[in-house]
Amino acid sequence: MKKSVIIGCCACVALMLQSCYCSTVCVGNMQENDPAVCVNTVHNPHFVNGLVGSKDIAGKDYVAGHESYKVKHYRSFVDGLLSGITMGIYTPTTTKFYLPLDANK
């Protein structure tokens, strides 16, 4: 009984130590805090805790030829849930592309 409690506590600690992965890249004159609108979302499949990835994503393909845009790459709650259910075998991420508000006019 004591051994199963210790194993359960260790598993809980390991799950709580996972963080939300998030990175933002600004291209052109776009700044991170500039007002922007999301124009495209791409879900990226990865395997074996992200060691085996899928294809590379080119931002120019998703922003319709605009020179200034922002790319946010992160692991959403659903992505983390899928990763937890599959025990790290399938670890998806999400990429969102943003354009400045004035670029859509």
Image (cartoon, grey):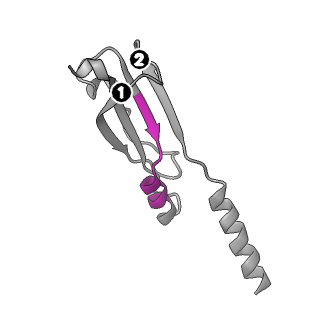
Q: Position of residue 85 (x, y in %)?
A: 48, 65
Tag nearer the camera, 2 or 1: 1
Relative depth, front residue between 70 and 103: 103
Mark 2 sits on what residue?
Answer: 30
Residue shown at the point (51%, 62%) measured from the top left: 84
Q: Earlier in the sequence, mark 2 or mark 1?
A: 2
- Any mark on residue 36, and which? 1
Q: Position of residue 59 (x, y in %)?
A: 34, 26
Query: Could you tell whether 1 is left or right of 36 in the image?
Result: right
To which quarter of the image does residue 40 belong? top left
Say what amino acid the circle numbered 2 marks: Met
Badge number at residue 85: none
What's under tag 1, amino acid-wise?
A: Ala
**Percent position of residue 42, x then y:** 32, 40
Q: Which residues are magenta?
A: 71-83
Circle 2 SS class = loop
Circles 2 and 1 in contact, beta carbons < 8 Å: yes
- Residue 94 lies in the magenta-colored region: no
